[in-house]
Amino acid sequence: MSAVEPEDCGDGEAARAHRILSVSNLTKTRQQGGISFELKVPALSLRAGELIAVVGESGCGKSTLLDLLALVSCPSSCDGFLFQTQGGAGGSDIAALWKAGRESTLARLRRQHLGYVLQTGGLLPFLTVRQNLELPLHIQGLQVDPIRLNELASRIGVADLMGKKPQFLSGGQRQRVAILRALVHSPTLVLADEPTAAVDRTRARRIVADFRSLAWDGGCTIVMVTHDQPLVDGVADRQFGFRLEQVSENLTRSICLEGEV
C-alpha cells in the first residue's frame, strides 16, 4: 500500500496557522522512594495541522509530557497552559481548571477534543473494525456517517477489514485502524505514544505518512512520541527533545526543548 497524499481540506493556510495549545514555564515533579524526577517545559506551542515529534530515550520524560498534554496529569507549577479547540472561542485555561478541581470539564475536553493512539493500538478485541471505529462517535452521541467512514478506511487501506476483529489483523493493520479511530470524531489534538513500535521500518514509514495525511486533511494536530528520530526526520514539522541534568544524587531534571534531539 502506498502512503496517501495530503489533500486540500479547504481551510487554507490561515486555519493551519491557528494556535491550539500554548504552554509556558510548566514543571511536573514525580517522587518515588526518595528519588525525584522533574520535567520542565519552558515553552511549547502547537498549531493546527502540525505533526510534532517528541523524541527521546526511555526515562527522559516523554510519557510524563504526554500525560500533561492529555489532560490526565496536573502540572506541579505552570505560568500558562491554554487549550483552544477547533472553532472554539476564548480557549480553556487548563492550569486554572486543575487548580479549581474542574475534573468534569477536563474530562469533557478529553472526550470531545482529544484522540489517542497507543503502542499496541488499544482496539477492543470483541468488536469488529467497523465497531471500533464507530465507538468514539457513539460515545459522543454523534451520528455515524457510513460513507465518510468507508472513504477514510479506503484511503488508509483498511476498507476490506471492516468486518474483522483485531485478532485477525496484522500489527500494521491494527495500528492503521487505531489511527483512524483516533481521528474519526474530528479531534483538535491527537496524541500518539510510540505508534510504530510494533511494526517494521517499512510499515512504520507508511503508517506515519498516512497519519500525517489524514490529520492534515482534518486540520488537527498530532503529537507523536518516539525514540526513533530517523523515522520522523523530513515528516515532522517540528521536533522536541530533552536535556537531562543530574541536579543532585536524588534529583534528575529533564528540560523539554524544541530542536534538542
Image: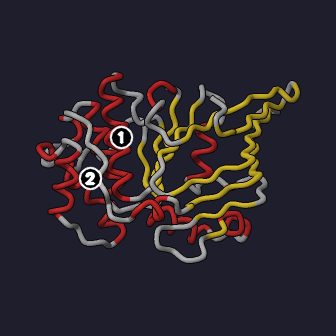
Q: Residues within 10 Å of mark 1 (few under 14, many from 20)?
A: many
Q: Residues within 10 Å of mark 2 (few under 14, many from 20)?
A: many
Residue with the mark numbered 2: 132
Question: Circle 2 sits in a helix, a strand or a loop, which is it?
Answer: helix
Q: Is residue 2 above or below residue 137?
A: above
Whole-percent x, y for residue 127 in the image: 22, 50
Numbered mark located on residue 203 in the image: none
Whole-percent x, y for residue 167 in the image: 22, 36
Whole-percent x, y for residue 91 in the image: 59, 71
The residue sitting at 19% across, 33% down in the picture is: 1
The residue sitting at 23% across, 44% down in the picture is: 156
Q: Counting residues from the N terminus, which is met first, the one under dot 2 or under dot 1?
A: 1
> Would residue 199 appear left or right of 241 to someone viewing this image?
left
Q: Nearer the viewer, residue 162 or 205?
A: 205
The residue furthest right is: 248
Amino acid carrying mark 1 in the image: Gly
Amino acid carrying mark 2 in the image: Asn
Q: CA distance from mark 2 to mark 1?
A: 11 Å
The residue sitting at 82% across, 26% down in the picture is: 246
> Would residue 164 appear left or right of 212 to someone viewing this image?
left
Question: Circle 1 sits in a helix, a strand or a loop, which is it?
Answer: loop
The residue furthest front is: 13
The residue sitting at 55% across, 53% down in the picture is: 70
The reply to whether residue 151 is in sight is: yes
Residue with the mark numbered 1: 121
